[in-house]
């Protein structure tokens, strides 16, 4: 296996000015003719040989400037084709044959329920034809698609359609994309699809045709995506001054897709799960996901396509920035506080865990074996937090000027994270050298904060110590520039902040840049409660020894939604950890119940969506991350017990909430969604009590719901309680009967069963894998059954027998034969073996070791070998 290093980056020896592709689609195989206009890169050393990427291709013919090449003129290996002694400037013609129907990896050109589609990022284009398949080679593409007349209603590629004709029984469709792009943004679709159309007129008055293509059965589920698209186009004009640039913007929904969606220029390809939505069959959470992903892929048109990455180490240049953009888009359209909490929760319970594991890497990695393994929460979500910190350091006005500069300076180019930061520096005049460590240094910084109050001097001082634990390959860590946003609360509310004689208002950002520093606040009349890391101002762990009463004060009174939620998480964490550690917990529990009572009783005066988030206990995965060696059984038990105790002690308040919000749950408005989320959490708690009244409530809601959110929440509550017996079984059957023809709903039906927190779930999983609706080649099905079981069923996955560990390893060995990307991704839960007590760690390692004995793809090999290191 070869490792690719950032330090080895070299500019390409050759450039491809024009790319002309002809696809002849036949049943069973596809012939690809390419005609590449190639020139030597004037900025590079002079090589005589042209080395192209190409994998799993059948070469039919090759010519340079119309002269056919013979066996001695070129050389082929499994990864490359080398053409010897090429001129300065020439046309390379190449014919290859590929087999889309046999492509189970879903990378390159493949077939999904009859239609042809492509996925080229990161390195899939080389499975279509020989090419310089690297993002810093940008070319103007023309694509001709030829198929039997009448075979497909829809034949699409990037850009604008030049012609669509029939000749000698063949349909020939010709596309041209005037914007230079790297090969990873190439796309082709052919199938029998229907299309929802609309128009958008841009701020400068250009008309853009908008099209969303789906299979006919899904034609009624595209309206929300279309509304989201127009909203996103509008938002990007207003927020970033970015206008759409082609005459047409197309989205195609496909069933078999390794991830959420792909931003191909002018022709986005989406997993059906991220574009289709209808109130009867789609939950509120899924609606929000559709809006977010539509926004994300659309925003890539500028942050990713017009300006792309020089090499894949710079992946966060486009992904971090685009996630930050989509996150702000969601915050502007939904609840800002809740969005911030959701983002912080992902960072804390997934990204921090990645940082603590064998696959830890910086936002800009130094090396990889398989780039597909680096589409991670670190690159995406931590990368977005880094851009957010930059935006906050600059402030809105300077940040906008800096992004304007970035988009104009680098338009049409493939650039680096440093280029992006340099625009921030140029506009602000700030020195961001230390800040740049966020890109190169892996790991989660810890801030240990202590304080003291001097009543005589009226001074309050905070001492902040920073420390980043070592990560694989990076033992020495330097101090980072960490923006720590804080406020101080006194008995009568928020306090004015005075530092060095300067008035800072009631909220300020402390620039933490040293290993240890102390900040002194003056004119502080009482010992305050610090509200720390407001708005989750940096992706760090905070350690500060709050007293229970201080947490309660922040939960009830803090003006920062994230801090209220965070204080509640801390209080719950204290209760849970005490229980896990077998410590006395009386005072803590009383405080928790009392605080929740106050919040629930007062729900009318609160942000309902925020309150709903505050009811969630910290996840098991997060709790495990608090320990050097976690005991998964103790964690699950403590959590389930606390859920039961809270349900019992908060019964009247939960029921009250459930009932009073009854008349606020119609429609798709933000308040209706918020009301549903709070009611359904209340219902889930109540079902932890073994009482037929609550089961009847759930049964009634299941039967009467007119939207998927309520119907599914009721089903989940029933299936997830051990006491519902035949009622739950009947609901499951009824649900399947009703929705068996909606693939995405059937996936939810799978998921709700494998995440059940009681009984022998592994047995249920085995049964579902043999269910007629299961299909091991479809990534959404793998996610609904295997990933849901191993990632969202902590108790069953960590069953003491270790059977679930071995089950996952066996599944991965099998899936890896077909789809390496999916296999590697499913492996994540096993890679965290070192987090657990020996009894579990040993069994998890054993499962990994059994995998390492198999013939593995590069993808799975990288994860397994790094995990066993
Ligand atoms: N850029 C794609 C991800 C491609 C993953 C390739 N293994 C989707 C996105 O981030 O928008
Ligand atoms: Zn993206």
Image (tube, grey):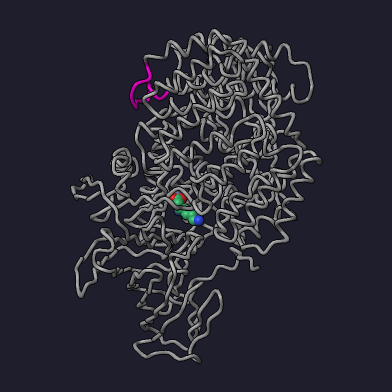
Q: Is residue 375 visible?
A: yes
The residue depicted at 48 percent of the width and 15 percent of the height is: 697
Magenta-highlighted residues: 664-674
Quadrant in the rendering for residue 572: top right
The residue depicted at 58 percent of the width and 44 percent of the height is: 787
Locate residue 280, reporting x and y percent. 36, 31
Quadrant in the rendering for residue 180: bottom left
Quadrant of the frame with the N terminus:
bottom right
Q: Is residue 231 visible?
A: no
Tell whether 480 sits left or right of 495. right
What is the total number of numbered labels drawn onto the structure image? Answer: 0
Q: Residue furthest right?
A: 838
For the residue pair 708 and 654, the one nearer the viewer reads as 708
Locate residue 393, reporting x and y percent. 49, 39
The residue depicted at 79 percent of the width and 19 percent of the height is: 583
For the residue pair 307 and 197, the one nearer the viewer reads as 197
Tell me: residue 43, above or below residue 413.
below
Tell whether 821 sits left or right of 119. right
Tell me: residue 168, above or below residue 704.
below
For the residue pair 724 and 826, the one nearer the viewer reads as 724
Locate residue 619, reporting x and y percent. 62, 31
Locate residue 141, reporting x and y percent. 33, 68
């Amino acid at each position: 296996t070869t490792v690719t290093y950032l330090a080895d980056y070299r500019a390409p020896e050759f450039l491809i000015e024009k790319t002309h592709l002809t696809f002849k689609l036949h049943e069973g195989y596809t012939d690809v003719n390419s005609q590449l206009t190639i020139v030597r890169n004037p900025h590079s050393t002079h090589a005589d040989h042209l080395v192209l990427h190409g994998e799993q291709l059948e070469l039919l013919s090759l010519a340079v400037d119309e002269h056919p090449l013979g066996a001695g003129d070129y050389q082929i290996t499994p990864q490359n084709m080398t053409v010897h002694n090429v001129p300065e400037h020439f046309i390379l013609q190449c014919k290859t044959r590929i087999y889309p129907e046999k492509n189970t990896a879903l990378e390159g050109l493949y077939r999904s329920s009859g239609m042809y589609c492509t996925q080229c990022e990161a390195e899939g284009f080389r499975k279509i034809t020989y090419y310089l398949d690297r993002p810093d080679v940008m070319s103007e593409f023309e694509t001709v698609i030829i198929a039997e007349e009448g075979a497909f209603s829809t034949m699409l590629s990037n850009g604008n359609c030049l012609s669509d004709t029939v000749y000698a029984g063949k349909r020939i469709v010709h596309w041209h994309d005037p914007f230079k792009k790297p090969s990873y943004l190439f796309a082709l679709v052919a199938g029998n699809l229907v299309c929802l159309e609309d128009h958008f007129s841009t701020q400068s008055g250009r008309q853009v045709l908008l099209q969303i293509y789906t299979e006919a059965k899904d034609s009624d589920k595209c309206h929300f995506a279309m509304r989201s698209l127009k909203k996103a186009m509008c938002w990007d004009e207003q927020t970033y001054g970015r206008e759409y640039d082609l005459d047409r913007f197309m989205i195609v929904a496909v069933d078999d897709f390794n991830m959420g969606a792909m931003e191909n220029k002018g022709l986005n390809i989406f997993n059906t799960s991220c574009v289709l939505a209808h109130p009867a069959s789609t939950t509120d959470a899924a609606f929000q996901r559709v809006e977010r992903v539509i926004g994300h892929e659309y925003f890539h048109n500028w942050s990713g396509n017009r300006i792309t990455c020089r090499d894949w180490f710079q992946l966060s240049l486009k992904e971090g920035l685009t996630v930050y953009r989509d996150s702000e888009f969601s915050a502007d359209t939904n609840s800002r506080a809740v969005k911030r909490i959701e983002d912080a929760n992902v960072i804390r319970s997934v990204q921090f865990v990645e940082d603590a594991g064998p696959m830890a890497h910086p936002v800009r990695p130094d090396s990889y074996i398989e780039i597909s393994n680096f589409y991670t929460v670190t690159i995406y979500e931590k990368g977005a937090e880094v851009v957010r910190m930059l935006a906050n350091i600059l402030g809105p006005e300077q940040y906008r000027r800096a992004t304007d500069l970035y988009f104009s300076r680098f338009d049409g180019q493939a650039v680096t994270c440093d280029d992006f930061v340099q625009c921030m520096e140029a506009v602000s005049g700030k020195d961001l050298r230390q800040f740049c460590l966020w890109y190169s240094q892996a790991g989660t910084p810890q801030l240990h904060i202590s304080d003291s109050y001097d009543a005589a001097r009226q001074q309050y001082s905070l001492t902040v110590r920073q420390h980043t634990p070592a990560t694989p390959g990076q033992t020495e860590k330097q101090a980072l520039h960490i923006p720590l946003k804080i406020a101080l609360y006194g008995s009568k509310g928020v306090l004015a902040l005075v530092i060095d004689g300067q008035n800072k208002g009631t909220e300020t950002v402390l620039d933490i840049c040293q290993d240890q520093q102390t900040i002194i606040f003056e004119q502080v009349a009482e010992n305050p409660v610090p509200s720390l890391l407001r708005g989750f101002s940096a992706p760090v762990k905070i350690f500060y020894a709050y007293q229970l009463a201080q947490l309660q004060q922040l939960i009830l009174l803090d003006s920062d939604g994230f801090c209220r939620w965070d204080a509640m998480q801390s209080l719950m964490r204290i209760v849970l950890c005490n229980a896990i550690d077998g410590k006395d917990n009386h005072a803590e529990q009383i405080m928790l119940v009392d605080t929740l009572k106050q919040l629930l009783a007062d729900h009318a005066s609160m942000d309902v969506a925020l309150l709903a988030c505050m009811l969630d206990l910290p996840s098991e995965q997060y709790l495990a991350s608090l320990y050097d060696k976690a005991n998964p059984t103790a964690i699950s038990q403590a959590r389930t017990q606390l859920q039961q105790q809270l349900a019992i002690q908060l019964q009247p308040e939960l029921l009250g909430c459930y009932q009073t919000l009854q008349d606020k749950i119609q429609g798709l408005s933000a308040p209706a969604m918020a009301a549903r989320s709070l009611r359904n959490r209340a219902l889930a708690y109540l079902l932890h009590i073994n009482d037929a009244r609550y089961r009847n409530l759930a049964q009634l809601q299941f039967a009467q719901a007119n939207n998927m959110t309520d119907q599914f929440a009721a089903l989940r509550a029933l299936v997830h309680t051990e006491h519902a017996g035949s009622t739950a079984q009947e609901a499951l059957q009824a649900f399947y009967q009703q929705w068996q023809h909606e693939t995405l709903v059937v996936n939810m039906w799978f998921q709700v069963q494998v995440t059940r927190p009681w009984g022998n779930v592994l047995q249920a999983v085995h049964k579902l894998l043999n269910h007629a609706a299961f299909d091991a080649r479809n990534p959404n099905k793998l996610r609904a059954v295997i990933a849901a079981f191993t990632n969202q069923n902590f108790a069953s996955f960590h069953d003491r027998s270790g059977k679930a560990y071995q089950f996952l390893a066996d599944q991965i060995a099998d899936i890896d034969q077909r789809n390496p990307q999916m296999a590697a991704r499913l492996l994540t839960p096993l890679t965290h073996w070192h987090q657990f007590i020996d009894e579990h760690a040993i069994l998890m390692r054993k499962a990994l070791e059994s995998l390492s004995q198999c013939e593995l793809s590069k993808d799975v090999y990288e994860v397994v070998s790094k995990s066993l290191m």
